[in-house]
Image (cartoon, rainbow, N blue to C red):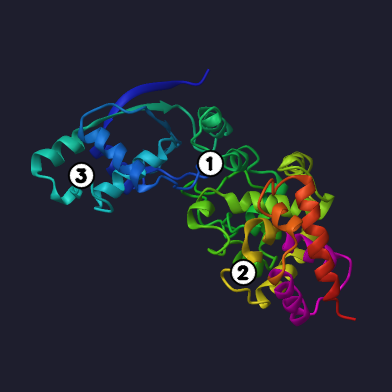
Amino acid sequence: MIDYRVRSVSLLNLVNDIRNKRLIPDAYFQRNLVWREVHKIDFIKTILLGLPFPQIFISKGKINVETMSTVSCIVDGQQRTNAIIEFIDDAFPVDEKFYSDLDGNKKSEFLKYEVAVIELDLENDDPKVQEIFQRINRTSNSLTSIEKMASEFSTSYFMLVAKLLSDQIDIEKTNLDDFREDPSIPEEFYSWAKKKKISKFVQLITRKDIFTPREIAKKVHLMHVLNIMSSILVGFYNRNEKAIENLNDYSEVFNEKDDVIAALEKTADIILKLKLKSKSYFLNKANIYSLIVSVAQYIREGNDIDIDVLRLELESFEREIPDDYKLAAAEAVNSTRARQLRNNYIFSIVQRARVV
């Protein structure tokens, strides 16, 4: 049984604790900030009307006996606390009024608003904290499948490599003290990751003409990378089946990681050198997946690719796209059949660009 207590905290004290770094709002197990402005406005209206909202969960944290202080973490309530701070900072108006436009009485009422808090008697790096976060959000629509997976499999080697390729991990460990990085990540992973060069792939997979900033915030590109890695290793499958299987199979050891990293970095270098136009057909999510997998597979077979020939072949294909390919890139794009069909076409294109 986990000890906890229910209490109320004034909004003023909550904000001051965050600003003074006594309360960490974005710990390692949290999702990225994804609320749209309309959600923030609606939430702030709730406070301005004096209506209640669901309680915020906080892990109490460890007592620093030297400073006689604690640093706590928000377990559930990050989006709400961020909206509060942004409103106070005049990041958006509510009913055409910024916080600074409110009169003294309104500001006072806003800051005195009592927030219901459940304070868990747990240290911030206790595994139970992450488990509680997962359980709170398990039946909620607030988290996507990949956000739940990123939390549940946070220390699986397969997930860690995918996060590294997606620019979702701090290999310099600059965020350990404020719990923005998972303290359970093995030290040997950091040592290995620091030796890897992945700049080209990160540049490719985070392109705004492939994934929007909101999609990146919701880790959509991370799911893409998990599926790219899985397809390179085991071929094609339906939706995310093999990716989930690999998160379990490669939870502690992922011997193929060096080979996968090298192939994807070289693949990204080739695709970036193609200088595809921002509206290129191959920057569609389904098509970039197929192009990356096809090029990586060909490279892993020991072949070199003529970039100029590949560019011409792709441009020719784009001018007259076969109907069955169009369908496989627009409907049921993550089915085994659609992925295999797209690969058959693109792999043939890549083969024609082979350096003889």
Whether residues under marks 3 and 1 lie with C-beta atoms below 8 angstroms apart, the answer is no
Residue that numbered label 1 is attached to: 29
**Badge nearest the viewer, 1 or 2:** 2
Q: Amino acid at mark 2?
A: Ser
**Badge nearest the viewer, 3 or 1:** 3
- Answer with mark 2 or mark 3, whichever residue precedes in sequence: 3
Question: Up-down: is 43 above or below 158?
Answer: above
28 vs 339, nearest the viewer: 339
At label 3, counting other C-alpha atoms closer than 10 Å, the crowd grade (few under 14, some 14-19, many 20 or more) is few
Task: State which region is magenta.
Answer: 290-318
Task: Name the side, left or right, on which 17 lies relative to 120.
Answer: left
Q: Residue 287 is drawn in which quadrant?
A: bottom right
Residue 173 shows which numbered tag? Answer: none
> Alpha carbon of mark 2 to alpha carbon of mark 3: how far?
41 Å
How far across and how far down the image is residue 64, in percent? 42, 40
Residue that numbered label 3 is attached to: 95
Please state the total of marks drawn on the protein image. Answer: 3
Q: What residue is shown at x 48% (from left), y 52% (from top)?
A: 214
21 vs 321, nearest the viewer: 321
